[in-house]
Image (cartoon, grey):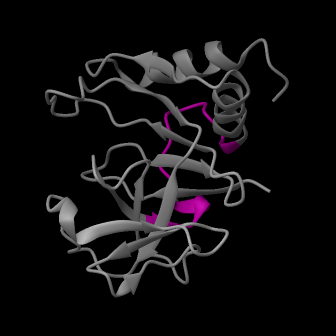
Amino acid sequence: MFKYWFTAPKGGAFSSFYMFNPVSRVFCRIRLELNRKTTEKDNGETGAFYRDYRVVGFSSRSNLDVGNLSLWRISTSDPCHRLVYESIMALRAEPEHWGEHVYDTSNAEISIHKGNPIIPEEEAILPDTVKIADLIALAKIAIKNKSSVVLTGKDATGAELAQAILTAIEPSDK
């Protein structure tokens, strides 16, 4: 029942990969972006970041204010749990077309993550030697273990990131 998608990278970076179960709301984002700016809550590491509960929504609007958390809530009135913006706009649980932005959260009172636009998998930019099947295998490991998998620090090279991915999935069945 898992669904997955890629988002467009900024400035030639690697794409991010998302894997999500809309029924259980189990979620894994594989962030492959190197040289990210660090913040108080994000040291720029690459990895497969697992959440046992996440609400995901899609919108063609790229300007939804993720900094003002009072504009957001999670509606639990239907089985898929929906992200709602400004009390009137329920984000779609499924994307309707390429280019929509993904918004996701585990708790709308704490933070909303805004992802880049979603893209077809054939447009995803991945480290050399890494395949989509490798990312699916990595996400499955994080989900099975119910924990995130850190791959590299932010200053790694693309080759180091590829090797970290392949090493992380080596004992698993791709």
Left or right, 153 with respect to 168, comes to left
In this view of the protein, which residue sits in the foreground, 87 or 7? 87
Left or right, 160 with respect to 120, comes to left
Quadrant of the rendered structure where residue 45 is?
Answer: top left
In percent of width and height, residue 71 lies at 22, 71
Q: Residue at x 28, y 52 (%)?
A: 109
Residue 8 visible in the displayed image: yes
Q: Residue at x 29, y 67 (%)?
A: 72
In this view of the protein, which residue sits in the foreground, 75 or 42? 75
User: Which range of residues does the magenta coloring cover?
Assistant: 118-132
In this view of the protein, which residue sits in the foreground, 36 or 147? 147
Quadrant of the rendered structure where residue 69 is?
Answer: bottom left
Q: Is residue 55 above or below residue 92?
A: above
Is residue 128 inside the magenta stretch? yes
Q: Is residue 111 above or below residue 128?
A: below
In percent of width and height, residue 18 lies at 55, 49
In this view of the protein, which residue sits in the foreground, 99 or 147? 147
Residue projecting furthest to the right: 173
Is residue 159 inside the magenta stretch? no
Residue projecting furthest to the front: 77
Residue 99 visible in the displayed image: no
Residue projecting furthest to the bottom: 88
In percent of width and height, residue 68 lies at 14, 62
Quadrant of the rendered structure where residue 171 is?
Answer: top right
Q: Main secondary structure of the magenta part?
A: loop
Left or right, 8 with respect to 96, comes to left
Q: Residue at x 54, y 67 (%)?
A: 76
Q: Quadrant of the N terminus?
A: bottom right
Q: Residue at x 59, y 74 (%)?
A: 94
Q: Is residue 99 above or below residue 168?
A: below
In percent of width and height, residue 66 lies at 21, 61
